[in-house]
Image (tube, rainbow, N blue to C red):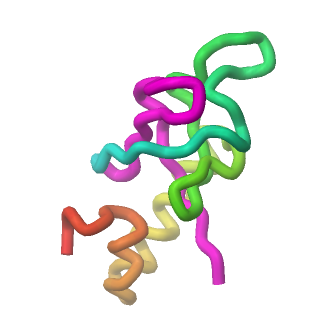
Amino acid sequence: MCIGVPGQIIHIIDSRYAKVDVCGIQRDVNMTLVGTHDENGHPRIGQWVLIHVGFAMSVIDEHDARDTLDALQNMYAVEPDVGALLYGEERQ
């Protein structure tokens, strides 16, 4: 099973990478599939992306991102392994 985790872009690092916040943990995410800038040339700072294995797979709206985070956090309550997706190694 593949799970994408929503994160909010907080900083553009370079033409391929952005710093993305996932539940308070900042991660470097490869933006090659969605681009660091939108179709109008504006940086994606503040936008939400769905992340899988270090890649932003798609841009999603904030409502869907927060719903998905809520669902993953509820899963974490009964299945602690989900915590690695949300919090990485920082919160084991």
Can you give x and y, in whole percent of width and height, for residue 90 in the image? 20, 63
* Front-lying residue, 28 or 68: 28
Q: In which quarter of the view is residue 67 placed?
A: bottom right
Quadrant of the frame with the C terminus: bottom left
Residue at 51% x, 68% y: name it: 71
Q: Is residue 35 left or right of residue 86?
A: right
Position above or below: 70 against 3: above
Residue farthest bottom in this picture? 78
Predominant SS of the magenta segment: strand
The single residue placed furthest to the top in the displayed view is 41
The answer to which of 55 and 85 lies nearer the viewer is 55
Magenta-tinted stretch: 1-23
In the image: residue 55, left or right of residue 13: right
Residue sitting at the far right: 39
Percent position (x, y) of residue 72?
Answer: 47, 69
Q: In which quarter of the image is the N terminus?
A: bottom right
Q: Give the answer, above or below, for where 73 lies relative to 43.
A: below
Tally of marks: 0
Q: Residue at x 66, y 21 (%)?
A: 37
The percent coordinates of residue 12 (x first, y second) are: 47, 24
Residue 8, position as x, y percentages in the image: 48, 38
Front residue of 68 and 33: 33
Q: Which of 87 and 31 is in front in this view?
A: 31
Q: Is residue 12 magenta?
A: yes
Residue at 58 percent across and 25 percent down: it is: 15
Tell me what residue is drawn at x 38 percent, y 64 percent.
86
Residue 45 vertical position relative to residue 52 in the rendered view, above or below: above
Q: Was residue 25 drawn as part of the magenta stretch in this picture?
A: no
Where residue 47 sits, quadrant-wise, is top right
